[in-house]
Image: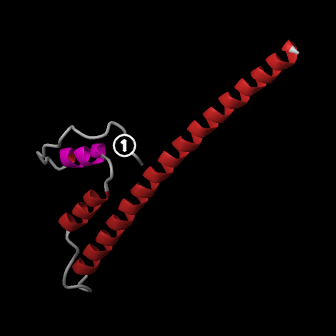
Amino acid sequence: MREILYTIKSQHEDISSTLTALLGEIQFQDVVRQKIEKVCSGLRKLASYNSSVISYLSGESKEALSMDKMLEELYQEYVMHAQREIHNQVFNRDIAFSKEGPKVELF
């Protein structure tokens, strides 16, 4: 009976360990997917901006999209404090952020 219980316990631990590892990998994959979607969205906005500038320079359009507007739209889509910090560093913006708030950022 002890041997059976030991075998069951051992198999349970193996299954639990495997499931935990799989859940971690699924979460990692989801985070990567969301980051890739954000990059693709930004690239689509940049492509739209470039098309607007090309149309303006070729005389097909009287006005080009504003780069500042496009960058502000990107900024508004950021969901993580770290994204906003990087954006501000790249554009030399000196904006103070509160360090208060949750320690965990959801994706």
Near mark 1 (Cα within 10 A), the count class, few <14, some 14-19 or many ≥20, is few
Residue 37 in the image: above or below residue 98: below
Which quadrant does the N terminus fall into? Answer: top right
Q: Which residues are magenta?
A: 81-89
Q: Nearer the viewer, residue 95 or 4?
A: 4
- Report the colour scheme: secondary structure
Looking at the image, which residue is at 22% across and 78% down?
57
The type of residue carrying mark 1 is Glu
Give the farthest residue toward the front: 1
In the figure, residue 16 lies in which quadrant? top right
Let me know if residue 84 is in the magenta part. Answer: yes
Looking at the image, which residue is at 11% across and 45% down?
94
Count of residue discs: 1
Q: Is residue 40 left or right of residue 60?
A: right
Looking at the image, which residue is at 36% across and 60% down?
42
Q: Nearer the viewer, residue 40 or 59?
A: 40
Q: Is residue 58 left or right of residue 4?
A: left
Query: Residue 93 appears at what percent x and percent y?
Result: 13, 48
Q: Is residue 5 left or right of residue 36?
A: right
Query: Residue 38 appears at what percent x and percent y?
Result: 40, 56
Residue 60 in the image: above or below residue 71: below
In the figure, residue 52 lies in which quadrant? bottom left
Q: Nearer the viewer, residue 80 or 46?
A: 80
Let me know if residue 21 is in the magenta part. Answer: no
Q: Secondary structure at mark 1?
A: loop
Determine which residue is flagged by label 1: 105
